């Protein structure tokens, strides 16, 4: 089985935010939630870089370790998913996530946040693949159709890579060697405990 | 002369013109910020930048430090909470096996003294009942996943925890009201005094049969529980309030802090309250009546709160110690 990961080649990202828009559209993401976002570091300075970030589907995911109801599970492909029926909206996963992935549809007081929502790697949830219930809660399930996440698939500069961690790391290494520079695999050391060394 | 200068300038311009395209071939963006250098220079601080969506918190790209809170919450607090509760129960069980139930040494007199008025009992039981639900639903959030989840299954546990969370959020308010009531009612009786030192020196008479150090309305042990409840309850109320209104509390770092303090305080206070429940019920004969009917047996009161009995009876109806006979003249 593959170990699915995301890798954003920041030297190619042009901050067009198409990944953000495509994700919202594909999954009918609730108002106020962005499962993916683009952050620009050193904005306006020489050498600024933009990074597209969503759930990194961590190894030993911190969200899963703090969840009081154990609603998280890791699929055979290494994708971290969660069960919205079990989620109680306590907010702990959002405290624990290093990438700001878990978000809530409500921000009302008295702890009413609603069910947590995050990037599913376009892999749906625990419901039957392509069922209506799955789509309503988690969005499209492209992985079950043999397709990769839409954000990476439609990236115009191919900055955002999705797929097996070893393969996308190899593609990134080749790019860095060919062009002679690379700002690094953003988030990898935090999510997977190791980075791509060229 | 001007001719020469013009010619030299032309040569210079030509050289510059030839070299410029070569310079332009160097990528000006090659030297950029790298993840490795940035994370090293930031230490535990988050990597952040500009974001175009309205959510300002989304500007944080990577916060590696969140993983340490995750480890603290997922393992340390989980194990500490279990240790606090189980540890206290084991200690009390040992104490019960060695000391047994603390009896009224002089036997029950059958005469009753009012110890707690209905207002005091109402405040106590409001505080007690809400605390028990809050403690159980709170413990469920920390240790339920390893204790209750394996027994009832994921779906049932999810429903139970969702109800528990609602109960926790709403019962916090009567808890806070009762906490204030208890503080107002009993603070004057809980000021430390010299009598307390004597009580502590004698181990409160807990360890030896027949030892009964003098005490007013509350002995040193009860005072300790009172102040633990007031301080712990206040800390729980404040941090809980912040967790209920996360927008007021700040950002994720603040929420992590409040959650940690909330959980630690709750673990310690739960352990203390388990001991309080023990001594107020199966641990001591006659103690429950104080909060049950509000009236305690006179002999129980004399043994455990001798100075208080003298205060309330005004030294007149002291059945145990007969007043000295006054010569009639």
Image: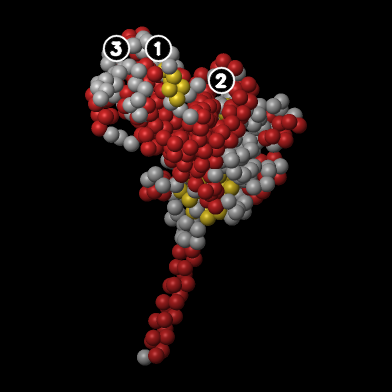
Question: Which residue is labeled 3 in the image?
Answer: B209
Residue at horizontal 63 percent and vertical 21 percent from the top: B156
Query: Which image quarter: residue B76?
Result: top left
* Badge 3 or badge 1: first in the primary sequence: 1
Q: Quadrant of the C terminus of chain B?
A: top left
Residue at horizontal 44 percent and vertical 80 percent from the top: B10
Q: Quadrant of the N terminus of chain B?
A: bottom left
Question: Residue A9: percent from the left, percent from the top?
Answer: 53, 46
Left/right of residue B221 with respect to residue A128 in the rendered view: left
Question: Which residue is labeled 1 in the image?
Answer: B108
- Measure the alpha-carbon separation of dots 3 and 1: 16 Å
Which type of secondary structure does the marked residue at label 3 adopt? loop
Question: Residue B229: percent from the left, percent from the top?
Answer: 42, 32
For this orientation, the residue located farthest to the front is B329
- Measure the alpha-carbon separation of dots 2 and 3: 44 Å
Which type of secondary structure does the marked residue at label 1 adopt? loop
* Badge 2 or badge 1: first in the primary sequence: 1
- Measure the alpha-carbon separation of dots 2 and 1: 47 Å
Question: Residue B253: percent from the left, percent from the top?
Answer: 45, 44
| Vertical relation: B277 (above or below) A20 | above
* Badge 2 or badge 3: first in the primary sequence: 2
Labels 2, 1: front one: 1
Q: Nearer the viewer, residue B170 or A185?
A: B170
């Amino acid at each position: 089985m593959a170990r699915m990961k995301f890798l954003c080649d920041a030297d190619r990202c042009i901050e067009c935010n198409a990944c953000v828009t495509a994700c919202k559209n594909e999954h009918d993401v609730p108002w106020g939630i962005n499962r993916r976002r683009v952050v620009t570091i050193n904005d306006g300075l020489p050498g600024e870089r933009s990074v597209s970030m969503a759930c990194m589907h961590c190894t030993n995911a911190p969200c899963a370790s703090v969840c009081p109801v154990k609603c998280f599970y890791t699929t055979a492909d290494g994708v971290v998913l969660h069960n919205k029926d079990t989620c109680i909206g306590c907010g702990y996963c959002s405290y624990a996530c290093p990438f700001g992935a878990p978000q809530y549809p409500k921000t009302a007081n008295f702890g009413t946040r609603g069910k947590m929502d995050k990037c599913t790697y376009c892999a749906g949830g625990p419901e039957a693949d392509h069922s209506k219930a799955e789509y309503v809660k988690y969005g499209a399930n492209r992985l079950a159709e043999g397709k990769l996440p839409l954000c990476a698939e439609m990236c115009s500069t191919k900055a955002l890579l999705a797929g097996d961690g070893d393969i996308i790391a190899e593609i990134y290494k080749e790019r860095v060697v060919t062009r002679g520079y690379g700002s690094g695999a953003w988030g990898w050391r935090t999510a997977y405990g190791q980075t791509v060394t060229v | 002369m001007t001719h020469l200068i013009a010619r030299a300038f032309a040569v210079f311009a030509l050289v510059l013109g030839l070299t410029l395209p070569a310079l332009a071939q160097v990528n000006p963006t090659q030297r950029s910020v790298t993840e490795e250098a940035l994370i090293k220079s930031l230490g535990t601080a988050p990597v952040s930048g500009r974001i175009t969506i309205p959510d300002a918190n989304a500007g944080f790209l990577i916060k590696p430090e969140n993983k340490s809170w995750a480890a603290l919450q997922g393992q340390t607090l989980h194990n500490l909470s279990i240790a606090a509760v189980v540890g206290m129960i084991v200690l009390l069980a040992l104490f019960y096996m060695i000391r047994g139930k603390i009896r009224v040494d002089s036997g029950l007199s059958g005469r009753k003294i009012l110890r707690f008025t209905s207002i005091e009992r109402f405040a106590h039981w409001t505080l007690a009942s809400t605390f028990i639900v809050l403690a159980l639903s709170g413990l469920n959030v920390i240790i339920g996943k390893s204790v209750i989840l394996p027994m009832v299954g994921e779906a049932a546990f999810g429903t139970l925890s969702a109800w528990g969370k609602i109960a926790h959020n709403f019962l916090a308010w009567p808890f806070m009201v009762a906490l204030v009531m208890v503080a107002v009612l009993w603070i004057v009786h809980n000021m430390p005094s010299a009598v307390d030192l004597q009580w502590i020196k004698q181990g409160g008479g807990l360890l030896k049969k027949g030892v009964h150090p003098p005490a007013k309305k509350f002995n040193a042990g009860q005072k300790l529980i009172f102040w633990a409840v007031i301080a712990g309850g206040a800390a729980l109320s404040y941090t809980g309030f912040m967790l209920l209104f996360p927008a007021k509390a700040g950002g994720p770092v603040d929420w992590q802090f409040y959650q940690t303090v909330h959980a630690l305080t709750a673990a310690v206070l739960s352990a203390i309250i388990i001991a309080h429940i023990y001594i107020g019920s199966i641990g001591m004969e006659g103690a429950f009546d104080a909060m049950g009917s509000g009236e305690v047996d006179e002999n129980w009161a004399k043994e455990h709160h001798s100075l208080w009995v003298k205060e309330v009876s005004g030294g007149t109806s002291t059945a145990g110690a007969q007043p000295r006979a006054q010569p009639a003249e």
